[in-house]
Amino acid sequence: MDNAASTPVLDEVIQEMIPYLKDHYGNPSSLHTLGREASHAIMNARKRVGSLIGANHREIIFTSGGTESDNIAIKGAALYARKQNPEKNHIITSMIEHEAILEPCRDLQKKGFDVTYLPVRNDASLEPSVLEDAISQKKTALVSIMFANNEVGTIQPISQLAKISHDKGRNTIFHTDAVQAIGKVPVNVKSLGVDLLSLSSHKINGPKGIGALYIREGLKIDPLIHGGGQEFLMRSGTENVHGVVGFGKACEIAHQRSTEYQNKLTTLRNYLIDKVIDQIPYSRLNGVRDNRNPGNAHFTFFGVNGEDLIIKLDEHGIAASTGSACSVKRQRPSHVLKAMGFPYEEITGSLRLTLGIQNTKSEIDQTVSILSEVVKGLRLLSPFNSRHH
Ligand code: PLP
C-alpha cells in the first residue's frame, strides 16, 4: 500500500534487462559489435519512453532518476536563461513540490535567483490566476509545477498553467515533475504544451536509479554533468544500459496497458476510500475526490498519530506511509499538508495509502479491516477517547 514510494519490478522487465548484464555488456560508445548492441538497445528504449509521453526519441535524455531530472530541469534551464539575459533571474514553483524541486530552487536562491513559492487551496490545487499574477514578463525564466502531488494525489491543470506561462512570460520555460503521474493518467507533452518533463522508472514497475527528462526539441538548457558528451551532451557518463533497457520496457508496458491500469487503479482507489470513510469513524479524505491521481488515497484519522499507525500496520505486514518517504527521513512535518492549511495534529494524524497494479480488492478488504482495529486501539490510548465517548 506504498506504491508512491516504489513499485515491484515486473518479470517481463527483469527478463529484458538480464542479457545486458551478462552477454551484451558493451560500452555504448564503443565501435565494435558489443558496443553497437548496447547503443542499439538504448535507442530502442529511448523510443519507448518517448512513445509513452508523445515525444520524439531525440527529446529524451536518460538520468539517474526523478531527482536528477528535476535538478537538470531547474538548474539547467534557469542558469542557461540567465546567461542569455541577466534580467531573467526569477523562478516560480509551488509550495507543495517534491524536495527534488524545492532544494535546487533554494540552492539557486543562494546564487542570486528570486524564487516565488505559490500557495495552494486547502485541497492542494493551484488556482491558475495565482500563477498568472506571479509571472513577470521580463524576469520569469522558469515555471515548474508538479503534475500529481506525491502526498495527497491532487492533479494540477498543467496544460492551462503551461499556456499561461508562455502567454504572459517572454520565453518563459515551463517544466512539470510528472514522476507520480506517469502510467496513471494520460501524459502527452505536445498536448500539454510543456517544455520539460521529469520521469522516474521505479514508480512504474521499472528498476531504481534510472529516469528521464523530456527536453522539447529546440530548447536549450545547461548540462550539470560534463564529460564524454553522452545523452546529446546533456548528461555525460557511460550509460546505465541495463537500467535504461528495463525502464524502456516498463514504459512500453505502461503504454500498452494504460487504459486497463488507469481503470483498475481508479476503481480500487475509490473502493478503498469509500470503505475507509464508511467503516472508520472520525476519518477524513484529504485532497480532491475526482481530479486525483488514480492510485492515491490520503486520510486524517483524528486522535491518532500517523507514525504509530504505520508501525502497527507494519506489524500486520502492511506497508503504508505518512507522506513522502524523503520528508519522513528528515523528520519534518509535511510541508504539503502545512501548505494546505492543516493544523499540527491533523498533519501528524495522517496516512497515505497508494495502490499499484499488483494490488487486489481482497488486499484492500484486509487492509481496511486491520486499519479499523488499529485506529480503534490507538484511540483507546489517546485523550481523543475521553473527549468522544
Ligand atoms: N518527484 C516526485 C513527485 C516524487 O514523488 C519523487 C519520488 O518520490 C521524485 C521526484 C524523485 O524521484 P526518484 O526517486 O526517481 O529520484
Image (cartoon, rainbow, N blue to C red):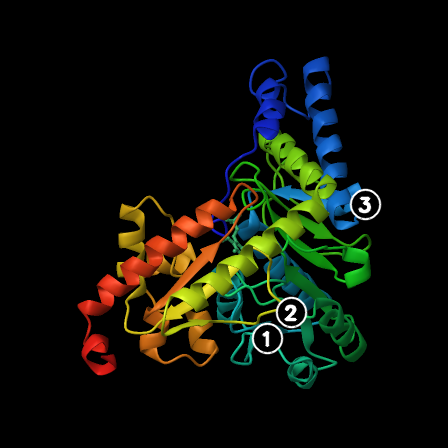
Quarter of the view holding residue 253? top right
Residue at point 51% right, 48% down?
Answer: 361
Q: What element carries label 1?
A: loop
Q: Can you tell which mark lies on residue 314?
A: none
Front residue (pair 311, 187): 311
Tag 1: amino acid: Ser
Front residue (pair 73, 111): 73
Q: What element carries label 2?
A: loop
Tag 3: amino acid: Asn
Where is residue 195 shown, x and y percent of the image? 74, 60
Reading the image, the residue beneath label 2 is 156
State how far apart marks 3 and 2 are (Cα): 24 Å
For marks 1 and 3, the one nearer the N-term is 3
Marks 2 and 1 close (CB-CB < 8 Å): yes
Reading the image, the residue beneath label 1 is 125
Tag 2: amino acid: Gln
Q: Is residue 105 above or below residue 197?
A: below
Q: In which quarter of the image is the C terminus?
A: bottom left
Residue at point 40% right, 56% down?
Answer: 368
Residue at point 29% right, 58% down?
Answer: 373
Q: Can you tell which mark lies on residue 56?
A: 3
